[in-house]
Amino acid sequence: ALKKMHSAGQYSEMLLYIEACESGSMFNGILPSDINVLAMTASSPYESSYACYFNNTLGVYIGDCFSNHLWEHEDAGVAPAETLRQQFATLKRKTNTSHMCLYGDLTMASQPVSAFIPPPAPSSPLGSSRASPSSSEVAMVSSRFVTEDTLRRRLEFAAQLGLDTSDISMQLESELHSQREAAVAFSLIAQALAGEDDEALSDLLGQKVQPGQCHGKGIQDFDCLENAMTLYEDLCGPFTDHTLMYAGVLQRACDGAHGALSVHRAVEKVCKAPETTSVKSKCHQLTTLEDCKAAPYSCEWCKSAAVPSKCYAEAEAKKLPPAIFSCQ
């Protein structure tokens, strides 16, 4: 889209601020340096961005760290001659929860910020409406865990006020269940692709690059990744803010030696696995090691450093990657 806009002469120069998890992936190896676009991202291609400022009254995080720091900096008033490069350096010092990156035409960074963002009028009330430490708790959490963290905070706040917490507790349990199910599903997808190759399994489940690396190998096969994610949503259910953290498994599979067809088959195999017996659901209802081991049907208690321990049906437990889960 940016290339087409540039070719059509629809802009002279463009400055983009992007607040999103893995926001650097939108430009890494993609944005040309000769179309007069400079992009400043909240995070590198390989990490989450973070939410800041939790407001108990509203029960939500009211901003992301990078965005908050950007507008707090601008509202505070800056020197008219401050350049985009100086602004970037200031924001990077403040945004210490993720690694900001610059992409595109870096020569534009020598231009003053005022060439793109006019300073607020002296009488503007804009600054007073921003999220700030005085109005909200300066809490920080990965955007992948915002839903869980928000529910835990609402639960604690409601309990302090003596309010009914049953609805929030159910929402929290549903979120945690979704996290566990996604962790297992993507572990099984990776194992279906890697087979008995533990090194290949490790490569699929974990990235090798450092989170703060702004430039590196970007997404190679967009079609494969898009199709795999669509298939997963169709068969396993929609992605959430949390489960999107596992999209990298599909991306590494698509860009590796597996191929689109193998990725498709692995997702289909895992997501179409039939809920064959009532034993599976019965095992899932057992929440302690003792109850799981004492069950009159075949259940196994499985531990993992990645997700909370859980009781699985024996057939399920046998499918879990032994490099990740320890079952008994």
Image: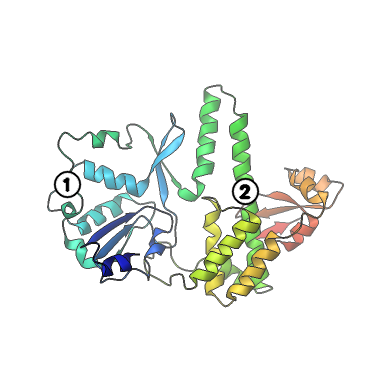
For the point 44% across and 58% down, the residue is 47
Q: Which residue is mark 1?
A: 78
Above or below 205: residue 52: above
For the point 19% across and 35% down, the residue is 124
Q: Give residue 254's quadrant in the image.
A: bottom right
In this view, the residue in front, 56 or 236, is 236
Q: Is residue 81 visible?
A: yes
* Count of numbered tags: 2
Residue 179 rendering spot, x and y as whole percentages = 60, 50
For the point 56% across and 21% down, the residue is 162
Residue at disc 1, secondary structure = loop
Q: Quadrant of the C terminus?
A: bottom right
Residue 199 is left or right of residue 75, and the answer is: right
Residue at disc 2, secondary structure = helix
Q: Earlier in the sequence, mark 1 or mark 2?
A: 1
Residue 62 is left or right of residue 36, and the answer is: right
Q: Amino acid type of disc 1? A: Val
Q: Is residue 322 visible?
A: no
